[in-house]
Image (cartoon, rainbow, N blue to C red):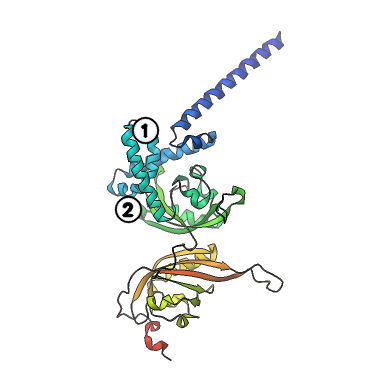
Amino acid sequence: MMTADKEKKRAISREAARKRRRVETDVFEDLSRLLPLQSSVRSHLDKPSIIRLTLSYIRMHTLLKENMRTDAGARDATWLQQGLELVEGFNGRQNVEQKECREFMQSEEVNMYLRVMEGFVMVLSTEGDMIFLSDNVSKYMGLTQTELMGHNIFEYSHPCDHEEIRHNLRLTAEDVWCSQKRDFVMRIKSTLTHRGRSANLKSATWKVLHCQGRAKVCMASSAASCLLLTCRPLPLSHTLLSTHTFTSQHSMDMRFTYCDQRVASLLGYRPNELLGRSIYDLCHTLDTSCLNKNHLNLCLKSQSVSGQYRMMVKGGGYVWVESHSAVIPSSRPSRSRPMAHQPLCILTVTYVLSGVEEPSLQLSLDQTTDKYLS
């Protein structure tokens, strides 16, 4: 008799458990259908992913709603329209034809911005959660938008860069009033191979990203404060070598070992005049901190972009430039060259961004023409 009662209770318990699982599955399916994703993507989501993406979209909605309350926020939200379009998938009250037309026009505009930018958009919470990435992230990182959203940036970034990331996530009193700019370089996992194929996450390599943007502080809810960033992969851009660029090679202490002929028309110096000289000799004194930061990033991360600084012109004045640099490693070590694993040189492409300013002003003896007369 006792055995029959136990079996009956176990059967009731198993049926109750199956019912709970069915209800749970139905709830997750309903939640999944609310996500503004394609059905082919939704069908491959597990329960933790559904929760992760739902929380990300809710936080993104809170952020956009807060930013739309101010004119400045509305301007910043323009380049985040793709995020707004995703979140608006929850709301089906608009006229279908008008909504489809508007979504098409806005998505085309967003895609144009992303193509011109040659990078992707990332929104980081102050805790480092990736609450939004534009869907073209897979083009540069191999990992898809749904794989990354909701995860923490520290799970995918290089451990040596964590302190720098924390520093940029930290909000100060100046951020509250001025929306202070952010400009830093970090390494993040990429599953793209050199042939453009996607590999397993365990085989991921480090890709260097140049991240620029602003801190956005939400006064109503600190949870909605975040960094709005554009992320462009380094190294050197493939749109190199226009008439307003010149290439150079440097030793690890930034002394010129090579410079192409274009420098003569842009800065007035002949290439042989620069050999053995440091790039710091040509930099405006007030901008040496910009070069120092670039140099440090090169030594630590092998790739960097300098930001805008002034480079002095022979004869007087200066031009605004930006340098994209990468450390070129030497060949593999061998018995005859045991130290061949050391860096070979630094390759730099310098973009001249302006004409000559204050041409009558000489800030250094290096700018005097008689210094180079033989």
Residue tagged 1: 91
State the quadrant of the N terminus: top right
Residue 132, picture quadrant: top left
- Per the image, label 2 sits on a secondary structure element best described as helix
Instruction: Report the amino acid beneath label 1.
Output: Asn
Q: Is 319 left or right of 140, judged from the image as shown?
A: left
Q: Residues within 10 Å of mark 2 (few under 14, many from 20)?
A: few
Residue that appears at 40% across and 88% down: 371
Horizontal and vertical percent position of residue 258: 50, 77
Residue 245, picture quadrant: bottom left
Horizontal and vertical percent position of residue 320: 36, 70
Q: Residues within 10 Å of mark 1 (few under 14, many from 20)?
A: few
Q: Is 301 left or right of 91, judged from the image as shown?
A: right
Numbered circle sitting on residue 177:
2
Instruction: Report the amino acid beneath label 2.
Output: Trp
User: Marks 1 and 2, how far apart in space?
Assistant: 33 Å
Relative vertical location of residue 291 with respect to residue 265 in this rendering, above or below: above
Res. 14 visible in picture? yes
Residue that appears at 56% across and 24% down: 21
